[in-house]
Image (cartoon, rainbow, N blue to C red):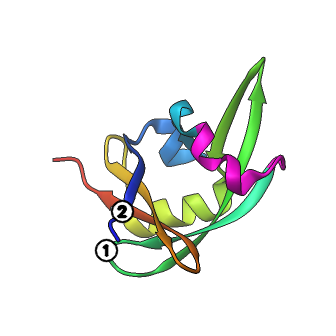
């Protein structure tokens, strides 16, 4: 089965130095795993190397707006390992398998 891209984005300074801000149009796609909680563990497989990356998906409220982020600990380890910089790109996708969903992350360097 083909992976479904959840989002792709070019990394900002915040993404590279603190946490990954998940685009707001993706909020509904993460509802099934959040199930009303503010934070959940999420594992993603590096689509290039097969390395498994543990992340924490957190829901944050800023004013009246809900925002999702991949929290610093796991995310910054991924950034350092991949030597990611501002304007590099990541793609986050999911594959629905018979035994559950598998998340994948892929990074590419700025041209």
Left or right of 32? Residue 64 is right
Q: Is residue 72 left or right of residue 17?
A: right
Residue 2 among those drawn in magenta: no
Q: Residue at x 83, y 46 (%)?
A: 36
Residue 66, located in which quarter of the rendered image?
top right
Residues rendered magenta in the picture? 27-38
Element type where label 1 sits in the image: loop
Residue at (23, 47) in percent of width and height: 110
Please report contact status of discs 2 and 1: CB closer than 8 Å, yes or no: yes
In depth, the one of 11 and 97 nearer the eye is: 97
- Check the image and report above or below for 34 versus 46: above
Alpha carbon distance from label 2 to label 1: 7 Å
Main SS of residues in magenta:
helix
Q: Position of residue 35 (x, y in %)?
A: 79, 51
Using the image as rendered, state which of residue 100 and residue 16 is in the foreground. 100
Residue 106 lies in what quarter of the image?
bottom left
99 with respect to 107 (left or right) = right
In the image: residue 12, left or right of residue 22 = left
**Where is mark 2, residue-wise?**
106
Residue 31 within the magenta-colored segment of the rendering: yes
Q: Residue at x 69, y 53 (%)?
A: 32
Position of 88 relative to 76 (above/below) = above
Q: Residue at x 37, y 52 (%)?
A: 90
Q: SS for tag 2?
A: strand
**Rendered image: mark on residue 48:** 1
Which of pointers 2 and 1 lies earlier in the amino acid sequence? 1
Q: Reply above or below: 92 against 26.
A: below
């Amino acid at each position: 089965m083909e992976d479904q891209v959840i989002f792709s984005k070019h990394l900002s300074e915040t993404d590279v130095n603190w946490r990954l801000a998940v685009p707001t149009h993706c909020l509904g796609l993460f509802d099934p795993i959040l199930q009303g909680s503010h934070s959940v563990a999420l594992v993603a497989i590096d689509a290039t190397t097969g390395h498994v990356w543990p992340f924490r998906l957190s829901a944050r409220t800023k004013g009246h707006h809900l925002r999702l982020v991949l929290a610093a600990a796991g995310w910054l380890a991924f950034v350092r390992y991949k030597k990611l910089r501002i304007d590099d790109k990541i793609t986050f996708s999911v594959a629905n398998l018979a035994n559950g969903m598998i998340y994948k992350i892929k990074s590419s360097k700025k041209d």
